Image: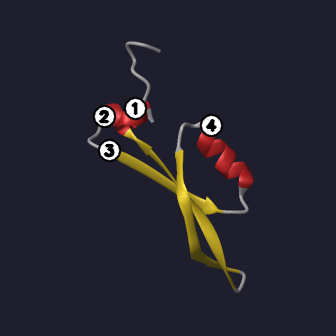
Amino acid sequence: MRYLFDHSTVHRIQAGTEVTNVAEQRALKKAGFTREGVLRGAGFRAGEWHDGVLYSFLRSDLPDPQHP
């Protein structure tokens, strides 16, 4: 993510997954993303509506390279 923020004007990255996808949620948290909330009935799969979880990472979430 450092490369993206250093070489573009991007301010926010967001990612979403289903509530039941615990492994992806764990990976997003490990990567530094913040859980913002649950999106009720956000996705339709296998004939049913499923809740999603929204995560974000802001430019200001990057660690200061001067103080690792």
Q: Amino acid at mark 3?
A: His
Answer above or below: position of 64 versus 24. Answer: above
- Crowding at mark 3 (Cα within 10 Å: few <14, some 14-19, many 20+): few
Residue located at (65% from left, 43% from top): 27
> Which residue is identified by label 3?
11
How far apart marks 3 and 4 lie (CA) works out to 20 Å
Secondary-structure class at tag 1: helix
Nearest to the eye among marks 2 and 3: give it. 3
How far apart marks 2 and 3 lie (CA) works out to 11 Å
Q: Are marks 3 and 4 in contact (CB under 8 Å)?
A: no
Q: Amino acid at mark 4?
A: Lys
How far apart marks 2 and 1 lie (CA) works out to 6 Å
Q: Pick the quarter of the image with the N terminus.
A: top left
Nearest to the eye among marks 2 and 4: give it. 4
Q: Are marks 1 and 4 in contact (CB under 8 Å)?
A: no
- Crowding at mark 2 (Cα within 10 Å: few <14, some 14-19, many 20+): few
> Which residue is identified by label 2?
7
- Tag of residue 3: 1
Return the residue found at the far front.
37
- Residue 65, image x, y percentages: 40, 18
Q: Are marks 2 and 1 in contact (CB under 8 Å)?
A: yes
- Crowding at mark 4 (Cα within 10 Å: few <14, some 14-19, many 20+): few
Residue located at (42% from left, 35% from top): 61
Residue located at (71% from left, 58% from top): 21
Q: Nearer the viewer, residue 47 or 19?
A: 19
Q: Amino acid at mark 2?
A: His
Sequence-first disc among 2 and 4: 2
Sequence-first disc among 1 and 3: 1
Q: Is residue 59 left or right of residue 50?
A: left
Q: Is residue 21 left or right of residue 5?
A: right
Return the residue found at the far bottom.
47
